[in-house]
Image (cartoon, rainbow, N blue to C red):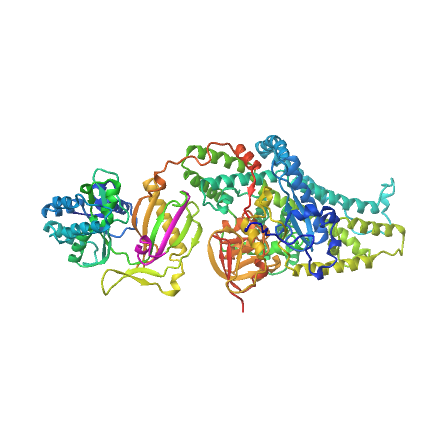
Amino acid sequence: MAEGKVARFPDPHEFQVPKELDGWEEMYPSHYLFSKERGEWEKKQFWYQDKIHGPEAMPPLDLIFHEAWQMSLAQYTTRVFCIPTAQGIAHRMVGCYLYVTAIDPPPPEIIEEKAPLFGKRAVYIFEHYDELWEKWLKKFRKLGDEMINVEIPEELPKYVPEELVIPEPRGYYVTYDLIEAFNMLVNQMFKGWQYHFEMLNLTYLAYLMFADVGRKLFPGISESAIAKMVSGADVSMFRPEAELCRLSRLAVASPAVGKILKGDAPAVQKIAELEKTEDGNKWLAEMENVKNPWFYISCGSGWFYYEGSWLNKLDIPFTYMKSYVERLDRGEKIERSLDEISETRDKMVTEYRKLIKSDEDRATFDDAYKTVRAIYKFAEDHLFWVEHYLHTIWWEKIRGIGNIFVQQGLLKEVDDIFMFNRFEVPQMIEEVVTGWALGVDIPLRGKYYMDKAAKRKKILEAARKWNPQAALGVPPEEVTEPFTVMLWGITTEKVTEWLKGTAVVPEEGTEIRGSASSAGVVEGTARVLKLLEEIVTLKEGEIMVCPNCNPAWAPVFTKIKAAVTDIGGLTSHGAITCREYSLPAVTGTGIASSVIKTGDVIRVDGDTGVVTILKRAG
Amino acid sequence: MGTFARKFDEINKNMAQECGGKAAHLGELTGLKFNVPRGFCVVADAFATHLKRNNLGEPIMEIIQGLDYDDFEALEQTTGKIRSMIETAEIPPEVHEEIIENYRNLLEDEDEPYVAVRSSVAVRDSAISSFPGMMDTFHYLRGSETIVDNVKRCWASLWSARAASARRKKGVEHSKAIIAPVVQSMVNARSAGVMFTLNPLNGDLSRVVIEGSWGLGESVVSGAVTPDKIIVDKVLLEVSERSTACKNIECVHDPEKGGVAHVEVAPDLQNKLCLDDAEIKELVQLAKRIEEHYGCAQDIEWAIDRDFSFPNSIFILQSRAESVWSQRKREPVIGKKSGYQLLMEKALSRTKVKM
């Protein structure tokens, strides 16, 4: 950069979002907005749009997850494990999009103070990881059960049932129940996100440490090689898919069940058919066993209520099982071979190890590897439990409250509840239950809320059409916060690209850059899938282009030639799966699914992370 | 087994003193069943006999005495004289006979195949077994007498100006220089080049670096074109860098004049990678096997023959120990540290993002 000329992004305080987004500010809590009081500090930071966790315009109620992780992530870094040079990641909303900033390191005396605390606490966690993980899983399952058991009344009864009055009045009734239910759901979500970071920060730190060791020993080693060495085979994110494989095998063992699953009827109809036979019922019982927790998996990223889950979109797991049963009929193997994956990884680590010439370096490599492997499983396992399992339960419960709002005339549609942030929902509950308590023919401010919901939906729609500014403020000289490096992969190249501007004109020859997540180069026809339901349109041998993909998408990988995603790094599910199936993948492009159109002929270079549009669809 | 010529399958890596380094390794690789073009070596004794029979040894040493190696013109003139002495002298009939016999028996199905005559050198009582690029190679030769003439030319190239001054610089006595030309079936190269079993830029042992261009490898070795460069992870066999150069010139057979010519590459090929993925993978696997056999990093010449189908199209033309990094003592890069120590260092470090 030329001296004296500071390249920077627009000042967040002066930045203007498009007019169509007017009114967006009222959708989010006040501490999420840029503000005069904090202006001096805010202007000095480097804010970038968080495409990993908030890739799309943010529905106000879904912001709760981000509220929860902002405080929890930072708390573990700064006050629990006391990572000496790192501080937290602060959030702001700009025009319905989430922006984040990694805060500068603390002053030297704080770093010095934190170092011994970190040393003691971090080492303890590494040394006790296995037992701690057992405990973690237990308490997380308990939390999930508690949330599942939160009772949301199906309706506000005309009169409270007698058993709640006689022989002994319960003492509190549905007005309180609903208030408590929402409060509990909020608390449980915050608690879940506290658990989320219990060991994650240390896991990422260990990963970065091992990556450094790898790069020092082998300057040319790729990120994906490091990721492959560290990653495990038996990961809970893959469990839902494994359960579908198991259910499919069960179905094949009983031909009548298999036949129904192979049919083209929708899931509901298939279930009705199955209920008619003994074998069918047995199989259905098995599926019910599996559902909790393994169907609590989002069809998208796990961050947005509208993505749906296997639980409420049963057609998706049933479509997969149809194809599994068909493949079993053809004598194909459908399961991932965990042993094979582990063996391949171990062999690879042995080979790299053999290339180290000095005994000292080899010993260091061994210990660094042991250290990262001791904890890395957490990075792979927590994702299912928090972003998928807990979020899915939460949305189902919240919809229960939305249902009451609709019944009472406060909202038009159940999902309109997501148009209100978590501080607004209690007011709505209060109005509804108070109105109910006051007696009959009590007016509510239904129109006010319905108008608000309609207006916010319009703003979100406009925000979706807007290509948000990639970054705001002043780029940093250094980044010390482990998540920033690992998750968002903030690198010189990325920031430079942002500085150049983000307006990508899609034409022949246009190059889109992302992470080289799975090696190989192929050319082929693109199929852009914005929603999981569109999977039925996918044809054998196409290149899948999607905002992001997760295990719910797993069965498509046997059909496609390569994958391109907007979001996700090397350890994202799409990347892991592509590596397993030896398909080239470029992940985290930010824009591929909006720039590329179905039918475009594209080249995916998984070695260099570049996607090129070769021919535009006619 | 003849006195003056040995087939590749009669040669192994320990025979550099007799056959020169290149032939020794080609023999070794042939024995290991690598795809090496058929060939034989006109052993060092043949040249020695040629000198002796023609009484050239002493006159050459006399001519070279007192030569000023920095006077380029004088050097060229003096060595030229020596070369012509070697080339014009009559080759001993028994050597002549053995060369022709081996040539005609080189391939089962062809009496007079196209061959290359390549130098294979060593230094008597020394571990030096190559002078890369110092001696001459002749391509697309055909016919018994042509082969014999070119063996003589190859002998004479021991006295190319650059070879003579290289020996001088390295302190190698001229009288100890050994040359044992290789006569080898010609690869009709579509693409060719070299590869290293480490990254020559930083010594990274986890990489194989391939450089290649269209046609014969001469254009790469001589620097006539900027070659394509492909860096591959040795463990995963994944390409980590692939740079396609504009290769406007290639070295190919010149059927009219004989030998080779540098010609313009077809425009649509100039900016096309000269290897496909399967070929890259196969080359890397070959490189790994060769390196493993020798137990040290290798510098390998390869070519892809357009007349054969993959993988039989891939030929190994030479392999020798990589000379730069292999000779350095490997110091520990990190040193002895525990995982927790490294973790603490990481936690205290600041990851720089350069702006």
Where is residue B122? Give x, y as percent.
Answer: 23, 43
Q: Please tell me whether residue A547 belongs to the stretch shown in magenta.
A: no
Q: Please tell me whether residue B212 belongs to the stretch shown in magenta.
A: yes
Between residues A590 and A476, which one lies in front from this camera angle? A476
Between residues B46 and A518, which one lies in front from this camera angle? B46
Q: Is residue B131 left or right of residue A366?
A: left
Q: Is residue A111 visible?
A: yes
Q: Is residue B303 left or right of residue A439?
A: left
Where is residue A124? Give x, y as percent.
Answer: 59, 31
The magenta region covers B204-225
Q: Is residue A289 visible?
A: no
| Quadrant of the rendering where the C terminus of chain A is positioned | bottom right
Where is residue B56? Give x, y as percent.
Answer: 12, 47
Q: Is residue A125 above or below residue A490?
A: above
The residue at the point 82 percent across, 57 percent down is A446
Where is residue B20? Give x, y as percent.
Answer: 22, 44
> How many marks are shown on the rendered structure?
0
